[in-house]
Amino acid sequence: MAVRDFDAEIKQLQATMKTIGQVLDLDSMRTEIADLSEQVAAPDLWDNQENAQRVTGRLSTLNGELERFTSLEDRIEDLGVLVELATEEGDEESLADAEAELGRVQKSVESLEIRTLLNGEYDAREALVSIRAGAGGVDAADFAQTLQRMYVRWAEQHGYPVEIFETSYAEEAGIKSTTFAIKAPYAYGNLSVEAGTHRLVRISPFDNQGRRQTSFAAVEVVPVLEQTDEIDIDENDIRVDVYRSGGPGGQSVNTTDSAVRLTHIPTGTVVSCQNEKSQLQNKASAMVVLKAKLLARKKAEEKAQLDEMRGDVQASWGDQMRNYVLNPYQVVKDLRTGYESGSPQAVFDGDLDDFLEAGIRWRRGAEKADA
C-alpha cells in the first residue's frame, strides 16, 4: 500500500472521529462525569438505592463511552506513527502490520459512528425482546428458540447481562414464546431494527420424509422504562392470574403457583413472568414488561406508527424482514437493507453486528427520506 494511501485513509479516520466527537459532545460528557463522580463520592449515596443505581449506572456508561472514543483516537495516532517509521526504514513487515491495523481501526470507527445515529428518544435504554413462533408448526417453535439463543449469544459476546422473564415451551420442541431483557445502554437502539417477521427455510429435522420446510417467528423489541417515564396504569384495569411454572416436556419448575400473568384489560396486552420463585417478584417483573409494552403502544399511537414500534406482526408469508435459508443454499439476507451473510451458523451464534449496523443506517436513511 502506498504511503499516500495510508495518509489519506488516516486523515479520513481523523475527520470522522472529529465529527463523532462533535455529535457526542465530549465537553458536556466530561462535565456530567465530573458531576456524577461527586454524587458517587457522597457518603449518603446508597440511602436511596434506586437513585444510587441510576447514578452509578449512568456514570459507568459515560466513562465507557469516553474511554471508547479516546482509546480509538490513540490507536489512530499510533497507527500514523507506525506508518511513518515503517516507511522511513522501508520495513515491509511493519507496513503489513499497519495495513491490518488500519482495517481493524476502520471497522471500530464505523461501529462508533453507528452510536451517533442512535439518538432517538429511547435508543439509550435497555431492551425487552419478545419472540413468538408463527406459521410452521414445530419448526416454527424450534426457530423461535433458535432466535432466542441468537440474541442471548449476541449479548454474551458483548458482555451484556440477560434476564429471561418468561418462556412458554412448545409440546414437541422449541418454544411458543419468550420475553427477556438485555440490560445494556443502547440495547434498544441497536436491537429495535430486529423487530419484524423472521423466516427460516431448511430441511425439517422433524419431517420423516426430509422435506424442506418454511417457518416463521415474530420479534418485538421495546425499551425498558425508567421511573421518570410517564405511564400510569390503573390497578382496576389489570387482571392478575397466578399459575404453576412449567418447563420443557411439562416438567414442573416450581411446586407452588408462583408464575404471574398480567392482562391489561383496555388494550388486551398480556405479559407473563415465571423466572423468580416468589409470586411477588414475578408480579413486579411482569409489571416492568407491561409498562414497557404500554409505553411503546402509546408512543406508536401518538405517531401513528404502531407497526414500526410495536409491530402488528403476523409471522407469516408476505411481511418477513429477514430470511435464513439453509437449503438448497446457505445465506441470511435482510430484505430491507440487502445485507447478507453466507454463514448462517455464525449468525445463529450471535454474529449480528453487521446486520444491526446495516439496519440502523437503513432506518436513518428512511427517516431522512420521510423528513
Image (tube, rainbow, N blue to C red):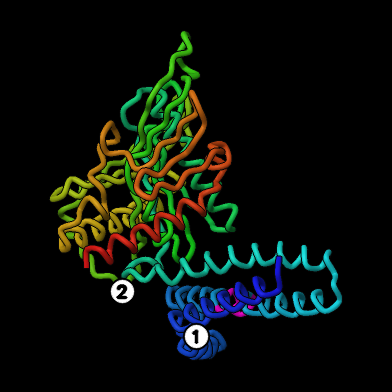
Judged from the image, the secondary structure of the residue bearing numbered disc 2 is loop
Left or right relative to 298: residue 208: right
Task: Determine which quarter of the picture holds residue 275.
Answer: top left
Residue 115 in percent (x, y) is at 46, 69
Stretch of the chain drawn in magenta? 66-71
Q: Amino acid at mark 1?
A: Leu
Q: Is residue 42 visible?
A: no
Residue 369 in percent (x, y) is at 25, 63
Q: Badge 2 local density, few (<14 within 10 Å), some, or many (20+)?
A: few
**Magenta run includes residue 10:** no
Q: Amino acid at mark 2?
A: Thr
Camera-nearest label, 2 or 1: 1
- State the residue at coordinates (83%, 66%): 92
What residue would you read off at disc 2?
228
Residue 85 in percent (x, y) is at 81, 79
Q: Badge 1 local density, few (<14 within 10 Å), some, or many (20+)?
A: some
The image quadrant where one finds the N terminus is bottom right
Residue 249 in percent (x, y) is at 47, 24
- State the residue at coordinates (46%, 41%): 148
Classify 300 as above or below 136. Answer: below
- State the residue at coordinates (55%, 46%): 350
View extreme (left): residue? 266
Residue 26's disc number? 1
Left or right relative to 358: residue 157: right
Q: Closer to the N terminus: mark 2 or mark 1? A: 1
Q: Is residue 229 visible?
A: yes
